[in-house]
Amino acid sequence: MKHPSALLLLALAAATALPVQAQLLPQAQADATASGTQPLDRIVAVVDEDVILQSELDDAVRSVKQQYASNPGQLPPDDVLERQVLDRLILMKLQVNKANEQGVRVSNADVDQAVAAVAQQNHMTPEQLQQAVEQSGQSFAAFRSQLADQVMVQRLHESVVRDSVNITDSEISNLLNSPTYKAGEVHLAHIQISIPAGASASDIQAAQAKAQQAIDAIKGGMDFNAAAIRYSDAQDALEGGDLGWRKMDEIPPAFADTVSGMKPGQVSPALRGPTGFHIIKLVDQRAPSRQVVTEYHARQILIRPSELVTPEQAQQKAQDLYNRIVDKHEDFAKLAKENSKDPTTANAGGDMGWFQRDQWGGTIAQQLAQLKDGEVSHPFQSEAGWHILQLEGTRKSDVTEESERNQARQAIGNRKAEQAYDDFLRQLRSDAYVNILVPALKDPDARDKG
């Protein structure tokens, strides 16, 4: 499954993008505070028993504009952008409410971890991030609340996916044997025009007409990313609809044939899918390649500090063993079996077997990079204790088959998870009571019906 910061596919609500939230800095609020005035607020939408305020919408729109400050021409007119952002806020509100109903809880420690992740992604310390947020005029408490909502939605996503996505060995084998899987990877972008659950004929007709408007705009010279921002209602719309690199079998079967017949740069016609209409751009493609890695064979001796052995004594013992190996040419394996405190290797004379460089952690990986075959490292410290490492040899190994099997499992999981959560969101939106109180913020089609 896709995992942003080692989290799942949605990566904090599909990229509700933690680093982006560091830009949610409401300058207008700061200006109002500086002038001693308090801007009037109003409710722009009712979402079940919750509301969205004008100030929330303004802040979110401002954040998007900040992201596109260097290329504002890609953004649609303000009225279209406000409707897009409001729809995203509504969906976020619904997901947070659903997570609360299901008993999802986020602790202060969870939020602290999210703050640290945002800070790291913005090349700041948490203290610097807090200072930047507060200098912009936004309270850090509100900022933390936004992150808590995102973590909650990510956990809701995990729960939905976990309960609905199963992958069998036969599915993996079938995928590996399919011609489309062997065809390599494609970089895609898309525009999605959704239809509601239980859509009427007029709903479908309106969605198809909107998809055709998007196609006409692209044919007329509009950049595809800009068209995605303007017309798409997918969660990634405000990121230009970029789907990134995918194996062909990560693409829904209904669209795979179309994509396989396209060339980089081409845009598909409007394709009807189970959730609506899709317009796909093939950004680029690349052929599969063999994966050859360097593997290491090494032995280690680990001396752990304990209640009976101080850290200084552990270091001295490791140094003494090193001297016996290097100066007195005593057998490394024999000393490892007698002295090492690593339960996985001690009885085998410290033999770590063949492994990829990072498999035993970064500290050991750094030492391996400095050793020649047969060489013994000086004692070095890790979180586990003091180590002595002997490099037995290196080899090149083709791990393509193992890697492909892992990738196939991930591709199937991603495809199923994406479909499962998309269905979940459509049903969630369909079942909700949503009343947009500002006529200008309603979808034009909805205004025409009303």
Image (cartoon, rainbow, N blue to C red):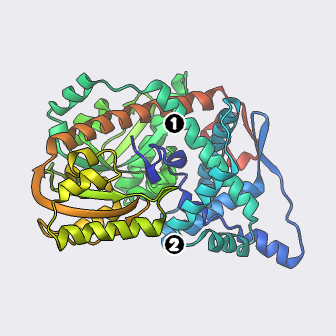
Residue type pointed to by label 1? Glu
Residue 59 vertical position relative to residue 378 in the rendered view, above or below: above
Is 253 on the left or on the right of 334, as rendered?
right
Identify the residue under disc 2.
123
Query: Where is residue 227 drawn, in percent x and y?
Result: 44, 54
Q: Quadrant of residue 436?
A: top right
Proximity of marks 2 and 1: CB atoms separated by less than 8 Å: no
Residue 385 percent location from the top left of the image:
41, 61
Which of the image's four quarters has the C terminus?
top right
Q: What element does badge 1 sit on?
A: helix
Of all residues, the one furthest to the bottom in this rendering is 35
The residue at 66%/74% (across/down) is 132
Q: Residue at x 31, y 38 (%)?
A: 411
Q: Is residue 271 visible?
A: no
Looking at the image, is mark 2 or mark 1 earlier in the sequence?
2
Does residue 392 appear left or right of residue 136 in this picture?
A: left
Q: How many marks?
A: 2
Judge by depth and name the residue closer to the eye, 102 or 425.
Answer: 102
Residue 212, percent across and down? 42, 42
Q: Looking at the picture, which amino acid does disc 2 mark?
A: His
Horizontal and vertical percent position of residue 110: 63, 50
Is there any visible trace of residue 132 in the rendered image?
Answer: yes
Residue plotted at (50% across, 65% down) = 121
Residue indicated by mark 1: 158
293 w.r.t. 8: above or below? below
